[in-house]
Image: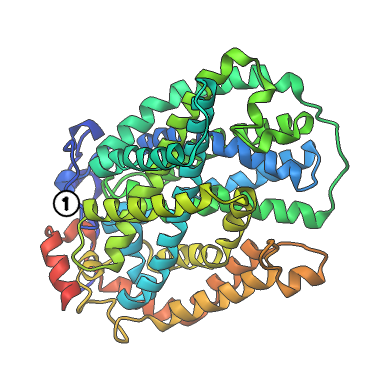
Amino acid sequence: MSATVAPEFELPEGGAVTDEPVFESRGIDYIPLAERRGRPIDLAWMWAGALFNVEYVVYGALLVSFGLRFWQVAVVVLVGNLSYVVTGLGSLQGPRAGTAAFTINRAPFGPAGAKLIAACNWITQVGYEVIGLALVVAAGLALFGKAGVGSSTGLKVALIVGAASVQLLLPLFGHRAMLRVLRALALPFVVLFIVLAALALPKAHLGAGHDGNLALMLASLAFVLSSGGYGWVMNANDYSRYLKPGTSRRGIVRWVALGGFVPTSLLMLLGAAVATGLPSAADPIAGLPHAFAGWFVWPYLVFVLIQLFAINSIDLYSSGLTLQAIIPGIRRWQCVLLDTVVAGSLTAWTVFSSSFGTFVNDFVVFMLIWIAPWVAIYLTDYCIRRGRYDSRSLLDTAAGLYRRNRGVHLPGIAAQFVGMVAAASWINANIWKGPLSTATGGADLSVFMGALFGAATYWLLARRPVAREAEVSVLAIDLPVLGHEQARAGDAG
């Protein structure tokens, strides 16, 4: 049976995001056309509300600590954050397949093979949650310190438990709550950025320091790509899947790219500028507040808490959907609770450790080893199949089009392995320096080599069979509703 595409004007218009249920009952289920709502611009507001975040001020300050001057940081930031176009491209699959990112991931890797990649993503998402929670605890301790309450083990534990409990609320309610709250936060965060810039920029010395070499710039570029647009692709379809299949692809890419590029670039540049005159700006709690007047510390720390909860909500929501793709039958709300416990426990270890800064740098860079090839393979698969997914087969893992070799798509696994070897050979992190990076004076080409070798290998091995699959795919717009119970039965089989 050949795949057919209904004309866009025949598709239901859906409605506004506000028409969605308050509590999202769906997890990785197929989203029926009658429940598709929203516009591409909703994604821009969501990303902006999450990414106008002090974490990116920290990342910008860290780039200066790598040994770059401000102008070099500016080049790296502006070039690196163009990768939000990749986030936009990584948002196109959801509307066509009608399900979440790591369910769609079964197409290039097979149902069983995709679990290995999903496990890598789950670890990554939890790691980012830990970073955010650790900063929340630090901000809470600073607020208590301002109130005259000294730090103690009991207070730290209480803050960890409290922060983890607050963090789970938005992901627990789901898609509608995420999009509405993050959109509402965007404007206050813009105001905070303006005030923060006005107070902190007079401390900057943009001409300070010495020019870093090309190897340092490449290592910094890898850091920006990982913490920026290239590192958000694994979350993207979890939010775009509620758009109707005929939604403008250009609109999705454009609005997602703008929603990510603008806040991330502005905040990284601010962090880098302040760090030229205040090296401690890389610490958003104990260092950055020295750049502005004392009266602003209280509102700054309160906003920091809210911002960190916002960005962590994105990770927690996606980690829950990823866990559903790994463990058959588990509910989305159960995943959120489980992830919260795991992230809270790891946060406790991080808070009582003295190497937080090293952990952040190594974690953000080292995750590129699997992310670099995976993103390229994921997008290459989409291009080969021209966006045609068999949505029923994505969920019915016991049989279906993507079952292949006992649930493993060998070209996808081989391409991921080749790409990871290439990325690891070129990576430059504290815990691992690749041999090719070492041989070239520390140049970090991990993203580019991982993506190139991963995509090329997949294209060579998979282009013909995947193209044939696309011709017999039952598109989302032709598909009757496939619910969670059917998906569970397929996984159990």
Q: Residues within 10 Å of mark 1 (few under 14, many from 20)?
A: some
- Which residue is most to the bottom? 405
Name the foreground residue: 136 vs 172: 136
Mark 1 sits on what residue? 32
Residue at x-position 56% and y-position 47%: 228
Image-based side of 46 in relation to 259, left or right: left
What percent of the width, then of the height, locates residue 235?
Answer: 40, 52
Q: Image point 32% across, 77% down: which residue?
A: 112
Return the x and y of residue 434 as percentages of the image width and height.
70, 71
Q: Quick check: 232 above or below 72?
A: below
Locate the C terminus and report the quarter of the image it occupies. bottom left
Q: Amino acid at mark 1?
A: Pro
Quarter of the rendering containing residue 115: bottom left
Answer whether residue 91 is visible to the viewer in this image.
Answer: no
Front-lying residue, 369 or 11: 369
In this picture, is 250 found above or below 302?
below
Where residue 414 sits in the image (x, y, percent)? 49, 81
Quarter of image, res 491: bottom left
Question: In the visual, does 465 lie left or right of 353?
Answer: left
Q: Is residue 46 visible to the viewer in this orientation of the structure? A: yes
Please tell me which residue is depicted at 52% across the width and 29% down the height of the picture. 150
